[in-house]
Amino acid sequence: MIAVKDQQDTYFQNFSELEKRRAGKEPAWLLSIRRAAFGNFAELGFPTTRHEEWKYTSVAPIARTPFRPAADYLAPVGVREPKLSLPPDFADCIPLHFYNGRYVEEHTSKGALPVGVKVSSLAQVFSAGSPIEKHFARYASYDKQAFVALNTAFAENGACIEISKDVVLNKPIYLRYVAGASHEPIMYHPRNLIVMGQGSQATIIEQYLSANQDNEDIYFTNAVTEIVVGENAKVDYIKEQDESKKAFHIATLVFEQERASSVNTTSLAFGSVLAREEVIAVLDGPGAECSLNGLYVTTGGQHVDNHTTIDHAKPHCSSRELYKGVLDGKSTGVFNGKIVVRKDAQKTDSKQSNKNLLLAEDCVINTKPQLEIYADDVKCTHGATIGQIDAESIFYLRSRGIALEEARTMLTQAFANDVISKIKSEPLRARLTRTLVEKLAQKQGKQNGRQESERELSRVSTLHEER
């Protein structure tokens, strides 16, 4: 591990200032957790590529940058916070807005919530002394994971959602995190806690984006979301990450599932120069099921790392996992998917697949699907593929008058659509499809250029002549 060293004094000072700022506003148990988490972070330091779980991802740029806590940052004179108006596909939802980690209550209109639903900011819950002690920081491990420890120590805000037994929430809950408009590197640590009671149902949308997509603000988002899914409860979770071109995004998402619960996730990564998301689903009740889906689209010097763990802790559980990557330019991607089947988890049914499409010669993908099986009556499969756009399909479209770049975009969109199509909300699915098309057009327009187009035409023509 990298000792904090150069930044050590800064982190200690920041933590000391945090304790002073929050003194008297938080319960004693939370202070105890904060101190334990910061002690773990100071001991662990930032992970390096010598650590097996971080073998292909260097966080040295994060470790070297003197980030300033967003809570201490005051925007320079003349810099205004952006308008946080909702996109059309979120017109009918329950929104919570955060800007640089701060809850923006004046831009939040929750309306009349159904009976049995509590939606608030975590800071409000801490101050009010709500009984969330039995859930907060109980699932995302801060004793071995440095970034979770850092988040647990410095988390001041985020969403706290409690859904009571048998409540079916028809409107999605929308958590919108906007960052930017700063003249120096800042960091913030969103912390979300969602507790779903027995038989409840809900859709959660978590979005991270820059205040201005054209800017190059340097900031560090370090997010942790813990979701407790009660017996027979169902949750659809969608995450969209479209941070600044020079932003760093580290996220941990943990599902704790009880008997016969159901989790369906779709994670989309478009932005940031360095991003890593770790998704952990613990199927801790018989009959639980989960579906993890992800799409990462990269270009330039972007690096995106997806780590997933599906922990089959009880028998008669099922899981499905599909992650797809579209890489262009000189970008790099990582997929490490682990399925763990414990000794008593008989009758487990699990399938995992990672598929990657490389659009340029210089992009790289490191994929590592894993199975750890300790039971003997299970059905488990996993696999990974890496390839380029099919030349025959390109030729077929070209022969029907479709331009080369348009043909490439069509085939790439079709490849990625397997993930986006799993989103149940039609307006959200349509908007994300448009976003994908825009990203692909930008990437191909900037990265491929005329020379690559000519090479593609030559390759297709050669294949046709050979046939």
Image: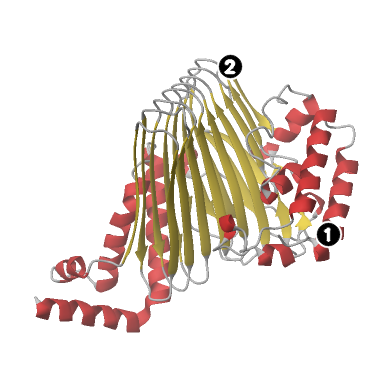
Q: Kindly identify which residue carries mark 2.
A: 116
* Residue lying at 17% horizontally and 71% vertically, measured from the top left: 395
Task: Please name whichever residue, 321 or 213, is drawn nearer the observer in this view of the structure.
Answer: 321
- Choose the circle earlier in sequence order: 1 or 2: 1
Task: Please name whichever residue, 396 or 322, is drawn nearer the observer in this view of the structure.
Answer: 322
> Residue 344 at what x, y percent from top left?
46, 27
Rendered image quadrant of residue 51: bottom right
Three-letter amino acid code at the position of disc 2 = Gly
> Which element type, helix, strand or loop, lies under badge 1?
helix
- For residue 264, side relative to residue 274 (left or right): left
Look at the image and tell me in which quarter the C terminus lies: bottom left
Indicate which disc residue 8 carries.
1
**Alpha carbons under labels 1 and 2: distance apart:** 44 Å
Rendered image quadrant of residue 376: top left
* Residue lying at 49% horizontally and 15% vertically, measured from the top left: 166
Q: Is residue 82 visible?
A: no
